Amino acid sequence: MNTDKLNFTFPSKAKMASFILMAIGLVCIIAMFMMDHNEDPEYHNNRAWSNIFAGSFFFMAIALAAAFFLGLQYAAEAAWATSIKRVIEAVTMYLPWGLSFMMLIFILAQMHITHIYHWMSEGIADPTSHHYDKIIAGKIGYFGTFWWIRTVLYVVGWVWFTMKLRKNSLAADKLDIDVNNSYHWKNVKLGAWFMVVFAVTSSTSAWDWVMSIDTHWFSTLFGWYIFSGMWISALVTITMLIVWLKKLGYLEFVTESTVHDMGKWMFAISFLWTYLYFSQFMLIWYSNIPEEVIYFQTRWESYKALMWTVLFVNFAFPMVMLMSRDSKRNFFFLVFVGGIILMGHYLDVIMIVMPGTVGHHWTGLSWMEFGTFFFFLGLFIYVVLNALTKAPLLVKNHPYLQESLHHSI
């Protein structure tokens, strides 16, 4: 094993690429707010903030799902992923950044600077106001102060679990030998508790932060649908990062079978997302209840091309491309397919957010959507690659390390 390649050095080209992406994205974001909005200023403002919300949520969700995947490996005491734990941990390090952007959007919405959340509108629950909405007024007990309490608990809880898992992992490295694997067992307990917390908060946060954009509408499958989307996005991100690092000469200890397993995860969770995507649509279409079908009516009338694109890219494409064993072991192929899947799930977030904020004013994908994506992508790349430089790429004092290093299927 080449010990010189156990410590990652941030390539100057990658660093420059991240800065360029952020610069392009920042210019696009500024341009969105400086455009002439005389025709419909409220629509343009909503679209601009909706793009920022989509970018913030998408990359935050990737980091959160990576934290879930890390906790899952500990809770299940899985050995195969031990050699890639540092990569997973690096992706989780974006979580505080992502949550900070989300909190900023929430605060601005509460101050009525943005109008992403209709239920935050001034006078929405006041019968004497011309903004009064009877349906939202009936739900205001769930929102308001209680919503903010839940939001703070999500942020604090997720960050605490993520940072604690990372801290214990790094602490184990500092020991010459950990006879009792004390830090590992601490993380096993933490991972198990995180699974319990995440099982609840992944759904409730999806209701609070995303489903509440369409305040009149609800779906019991929505939380799982959002979860599956963020999980597959995280798996793709981790896999692409592993392949890139191997190309640079790092992670030579990661076996082809480990990458193959990541490919299997990508294939499987793509089907989970498709199952939930179709189930939510089919059940609402079949029941034909007016307050439920309105969600899909808007998307069918004004976002039909986007709906079909999302379904094809996130289901048919990975189903065909990742079915064979060879495809999961072809590194170039995994990166190519993964990049398309990742873009497909970003479009899925766009499709979830835009109809509830800009409605039928949608004019199709434009530089606004892609420019915002570039900014958050650049920031994500910089934070994750910088996190990789903070610790050796191979964990120490882990009871399953040797099993992972010789993993073969």
Image: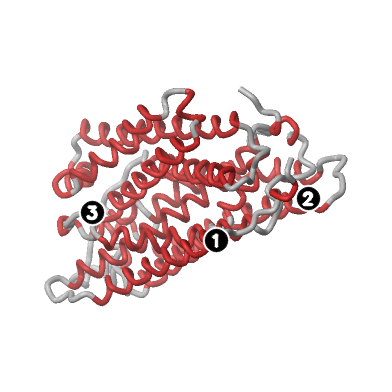
Q: The residue tagged with tag 2: helix, strand or loop?
A: helix
Please state the horizontal and vertical placement of residue 226, each as a whole percent of the image: 40, 44
* Residue at the (74%, 40%) spot, across then down: 1
Residue at mark 1 to residue at mark 2: CA–CA distance: 22 Å
Q: The residue tagged with tag 3: helix, strand or loop?
A: helix
The amino acid pointed to by label 1 is: Val
What residue is shown with label 2?
A: 173
What residue is shown with label 1?
A: 383
* Mark 2 Cα shell of 10 Å, populated few (<14), some (14-19), many (≥20): some
Please state the horizontal and vertical placement of residue 364, each as a whole percent of the image: 19, 54
* Residue 224 can be seen in this image: no
Mark 3 or mark 2, whichever is nearer to me: 2
What residue is shown with label 3?
A: 355
Q: Residue furthest left?
A: 39
Label pair 3/2, CB-CB below 8 angstroms: no
* Mark 3 Cα shell of 10 Å, populated few (<14), some (14-19), many (≥20): many
Question: Which callout, 3 or 1, points at the residue further toward the start of the chain?
Answer: 3
* Residue 363 can be seen in this image: yes
Please state the horizontal and vertical placement of residue 356, each as a whole percent of the image: 25, 55
Residue at mark 3 to residue at mark 2: CA–CA distance: 48 Å
* Mark 1 Cα shell of 10 Å, populated few (<14), some (14-19), many (≥20): some
The amino acid pointed to by label 3 is: Pro
Q: Quadrant of residue 23?
A: bottom left
Q: The residue tagged with tag 1: helix, strand or loop?
A: helix
